[in-house]
Amino acid sequence: MNKLQVTNIHKSFHDHDVLKGVSFSADKGEVLALMGSSGSGKSTLLRCINLLTVPDDGSIQIDEQKILFNAAERSTLSNSQIARLRKKIGMVFQQFNLWAHMTVLENLIEAPIHVLKQNKQQTIEQAKILLQKVGLSDKLNKYPVQLSGGQQQRAAIARALMMKPEIMLFDEPTSALDPEMVGEVLSVMQQLATEGMTMIISTHELGFARRVANRCIFLNEGMIIEQGATQDMFANPQTARFRKFLEAMQH
Ligand code: ADP
Ligand code: MG
């Protein structure tokens, strides 16, 4: 069975149809690159998957938990259903989103202690292991403002991993970084992929997508117009739109 099955997702804001029936699936351990020009709906789609935005229609299934979003079902969507789905999904945003008034360590332990009710000492140990993994062992008592963008983003990834997600969503995780910091964040993500994390990454880093993603999705005006194995998609784009996108990105 697929780890994640997204079926016929629709989302409008006022009368602007942003997602017009998006369907795809991901197996456990797959890395999907989500591509598309600005405004194509990438962020909205990722936000729908972890229910930061509630879709207007369609369904999302993770393992055996399926949530339907048609009007009748949506009104009965319970907080516990939402919480159960969200708990399986970690999300990393373009703008890091660390809490400015907390140290790196406090950022990491906050949700596990207060949401998952974990033991504090064990949670601190878990945080130290993850900070070591992302190369921030020496920054645990620093505040976000004392870190570079790349360090903040690595801390944000570690914070998401503290919740032991089964799927990680990344929304243009390197777009806000100075070029010299992109590599350190991508290498943490590459490591996660190697360890078998199921990941969906919206990105303009095509070199990274080619290297790390086994499948790609190309979103155009709220619809997936191409998807497939990474090598095939890059070698043999099927639509003029995707071909133009690749050309624009590579120059
Ligand atoms: P991408 O991430 O691919 O750049 P987005 O998902 O951010 O695209 O946006 C797709 C479209 O949806 C844009 O036209 C954007 O203005 C619109 N949109 C996104 N979120 C909202 C919102 N909360 N309210 C109104 N319009 C929105
Ligand atoms: Mg976006």
Image (spheres, helix red, strand yellow):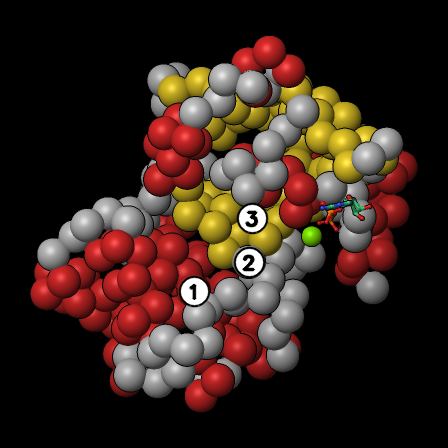
Q: Amino acid at mark 2?
A: Phe
128 relative to 101 in the view: left or right: left
Q: Specify the quadrant of the image occupied by residue 19.
A: top right
Label 1 element class: helix
**Crowd tier of the residue under label 1, counting other residues whose Cα lies within 10 Å: few below 14, some 14–19, many 20 or above:** many
Q: Which residue carries the number 3 mark?
A: 201
Image location (x, y in percent) of residue 198: 41, 40
Q: Residue furthest bottom?
A: 146
Sequence-wise first label, 2 or 1: 2
Residue placed under numbered mark 1 in the picture: 156
Please tell me which residue is depicted at 44% across the width and 58% down the height of the picture: 189
Nearest the viewer among 234 and 163 is 163
- Whether residue 39 appears in this view of the structure is yes
Rounded to the nearest angstrom, the CA distance separating label 3 from label 2 is 10 Å
For the N terminus, the quadrant is top left
- Residue of label 2: 93
- Residue 209, percent across and down? 59, 51
Above or below, 168 relative to 121: above
Residue 154 in sight: no
Query: How far separated are the C-alphas under marks 2 and 1?
Result: 8 Å
Q: Nearer the viewer, residue 150 or 18?
A: 18
